[in-house]
Image (tube, helix red, strand yellow):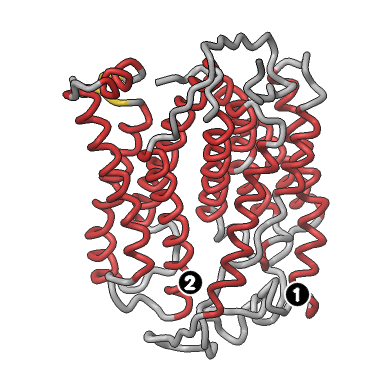
C-alpha cells in the first residue's frame, strides 16, 4: 500500500516504510495555528515595508505591525500548550506527544516547539527595541537594522520551528501510512515557499530591479536560495518540491503587487519627492521558479550520483538558468512595456528622488567584462556550497520524527 510519497531520485539507498494501517486522525489544530502564524508574519512584513514606502512610520500600532507580532503571540500559544500538555498532561494525547518529544531542561515537547518558542520571544523582544531605535535614530531606510535583524531572525525561527513540527508529523505519517501525509506535505511545502520568500525579502536590497545587471544580485540569490530548494526537495519526498516552493514565493509577491495598490495612502513624513496616492507594492519577483524547475528535472535523473557531484552540477545549473532568464528580464523591467499594473515598475516610494536610477529606469553601475566574470564565478561557487548544505540537511531532516 502506497502513501503517495515520491522519493527524490537523487536520494541513494532504499526507503523502508512500515505500515500499521491508515489513521483517520485529523491534522492537529496547533499545526494549522502555526501555519496561520507564519502566514500572518509574511503578510505583515510585506505590508509594513509598503507602509514605510507609502506613508512613513506614523505609529508603532499599525495594522502591519500587529500582523507581524500576531505571529509571535500565536507561536507562544502553540508552544505553551504543547510544553504544558506534553510535560504535565495525563491524557492519552499527552502520552502520544511525550512519545514523540524531546527533553530540554526538564520540559518536554516536539523539537520544533522549542525553536518556534525562541523565535516568538525574539520577535516580541524586538518590538520595544525597534520603537526605541526609531525614536533615537529616526526613520530607518534599511531592512537590516539591528531591531529588524532580531525580528527577522525571530520570524525565521518560528517558521522553521513550525516546519520541524510539521516535518516530524509528516515523517511519522509516511512510516505508518497515515492518510494525513499528503496534507502535511502540502503544508510543509507551503511554509517552505514562505521561507523562500523570507530569504528573498532579507536580500531585497541586493536584488532591486536597478541592480539586476550586477553580479552582487546573483551572489546574494546563490547564497540564499539553493540551500532551501535542496533541503525541501530532500525532506518532502516530492519530485516537484523546488518548483512548488519557488512558486509559492512568486505567487505571494504577485498577489501583493495586485492587491496593495487598491488601498489609498498618503505620505505623512517628508520630504516627499514622488506623489504617492496608494500603497506601494514590492518589486516584481525574481524568476527563481525557472531554475527551481530545472533543478527538479535534473535531480530526477541522478539517482546514483554522489552528493558532491549533485551539488557541483546543481549549483552551476541554478546560476546558469537564473542568469539566462533574469538578465534579459531585467532589461524588460527597465523598458516602458513593464510600466503597468501587473509588473508595477512605475510605482515608487515617496522618498524616491527625480535623479534616482529607478525613476530614470537605468541600471545601477552594471558589471561588465572581467568584473562580471569574477562575480559570476563567485556566485557559482556559493550556489554549489549552498546546494551541498541543503542536500545534507534535507537528508538529515528525513529522519526527524520528534
Q: Is residue 59 visible?
A: yes
Q: Residues within 10 Å of mark 1 (few under 14, many from 20)?
A: some
Identify which residue is drawn at 58% across, 79% down: 348
Q: Residue 116 falls in which quadrant of the image? A: top left
Task: Reply above or below: 321 against 327.
Answer: above
Could you tell me residue 128's position as x and y percent?
22, 60
User: Which image quarter: residue 251?
Assistant: bottom right
Q: Quadrant of the C terminus?
A: top left
Image coords of residue 379 (percent x, y): 69, 42
Q: Which residue is mark 2?
A: 50
Coordinates of residue 66 in the picture (x, y in percent)? 32, 63
Which residue is under mark 1?
A: 338
At 62% from the left and 67% from the top, the residue drawn is: 283
Q: Is residue 392 above or below residue 240?
A: above
* Residue in the picture at 24% in, 58% down: 129
Q: Secondary structure at mark 1?
A: helix
Front-most of residues 302 and 140: 302
Q: Please indicate, yes or no, whether residue 388 appears anywhere in the rendered image.
A: no
Q: Secondary structure at mark 2?
A: helix
Label 2 crowd bin: few (<14), some (14–19), many (20+), radius 10 Å: many
Distance CA(mark 1)–CA(mark 2): 20 Å
Identify which residue, 169 or 198, lies in the foreground: 169
Image coordinates of residue 146 in percent, x first then y, are: 34, 55
Amino acid at each position: 500500500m502506497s502513501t503517495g510519497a515520491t522519493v527524490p531520485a537523487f536520494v541513494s539507498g532504499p526507503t523502508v516504510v512500515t505500515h500499521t494501517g491508515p489513521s483517520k486522525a485529523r491534522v492537529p489544530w496547533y499545526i494549522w495555528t502555526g501555519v496561520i502564524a507564519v502566514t500572518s508574519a509574511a503578510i505583515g512584513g510585506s505590508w509594513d515595508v509598503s507602509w514605510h514606502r507609502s506613508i512613513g512610520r506614523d505609529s508603532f500600532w499599525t495594522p502591519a505591525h500587529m500582523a507581524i507580532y500576531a505571529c509571535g503571540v500565536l507561536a507562544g500559544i502553540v508552544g505553551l500548550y504543547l510544553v504544558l500538555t506534553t510535560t504535565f498532561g495525563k491524557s492519552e494525547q499527552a502520552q502520544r506527544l511525550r512519545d514523540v518529544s524531546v527533553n530540554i531542561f526538564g520540559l518536554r515537547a516536539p523539537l520544533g516547539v522549542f525553536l518556534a518558542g525562541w523565535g516568538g520571544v525574539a520577535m516580541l523582544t524586538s518590538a520595544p527595541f525597534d520603537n526605541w531605535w526609531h525614536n533615537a535614530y529616526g526613520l530607518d531606510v534599511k531592512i537590516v537594522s539591528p531591531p529588524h535583524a532580531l525580528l527577522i531572525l525571530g520570524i525565521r525561527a518560528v517558521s522553521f520551528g513550525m516546519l520541524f513540527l510539521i516535518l516530524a508529523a509528516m515523517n511519522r505519517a509516511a512510516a505508518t501510512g497515515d492518510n494525513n501525509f499528503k496534507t502535511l506535505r502540502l503544508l510543509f511545502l507551503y511554509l517552505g515557499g514562505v521561507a523562500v520568500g523570507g530569504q528573498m525579502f532579507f536580500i531585497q536590497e541586493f536584488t532591486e530591479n536597478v541592480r539586476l545587471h550586477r553580479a552582487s544580485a546573483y551572489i546574494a540569490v546563490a547564497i540564499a536560495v539553493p540551500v532551501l530548494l535542496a533541503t525541501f526537495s530532500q525532506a518532502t519526498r516530492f519530485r516537484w518540491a523546488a518548483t512548488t516552493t519557488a512558486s509559492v514565493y512568486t505567487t505571494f509577491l504577485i498577489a501583493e503587487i495586485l492587491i496593495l495598490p487598491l488601498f489609498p495612502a498618503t505620505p505623512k513624513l517628508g520630504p516627499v519627492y514622488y506623489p504617492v496616492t496608494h500603497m506601494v507594492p514590492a518589486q516584481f519577483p525574481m524568476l527563481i521558479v525557472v531554475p527551481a524547475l530545472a533543478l527538479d528535472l535534473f535531480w530526477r535523473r541522478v539517482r546514483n550520483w554522489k552528493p558532491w557531484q549533485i551539488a557541483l552540477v546543481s549549483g552551476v545549473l541554478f546560476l546558469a538558468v537564473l542568469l539566462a532568464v533574469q538578465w534579459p528580464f531585467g532589461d524588460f523591467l527597465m523598458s516602458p512595456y513593464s510600466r503597468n499594473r501587473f509588473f508595477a515598475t512605475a510605482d515608487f516610494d515617496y522618498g524616491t528622488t527625480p535623479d534616482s536610477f529607478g525613476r530614470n529606469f537605468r541600471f545601477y553601475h552594471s558589471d561588465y567584462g572581467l568584473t562580471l566574470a569574477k562575480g559570476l564565478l563567485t556566485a557559482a561557487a556559493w550556489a554549489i556550497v549552498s546546494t551541498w548544505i541543503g542536500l545534507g540537511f534535507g537528508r538529515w531532516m528525513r529522519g526527524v520524527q520528534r
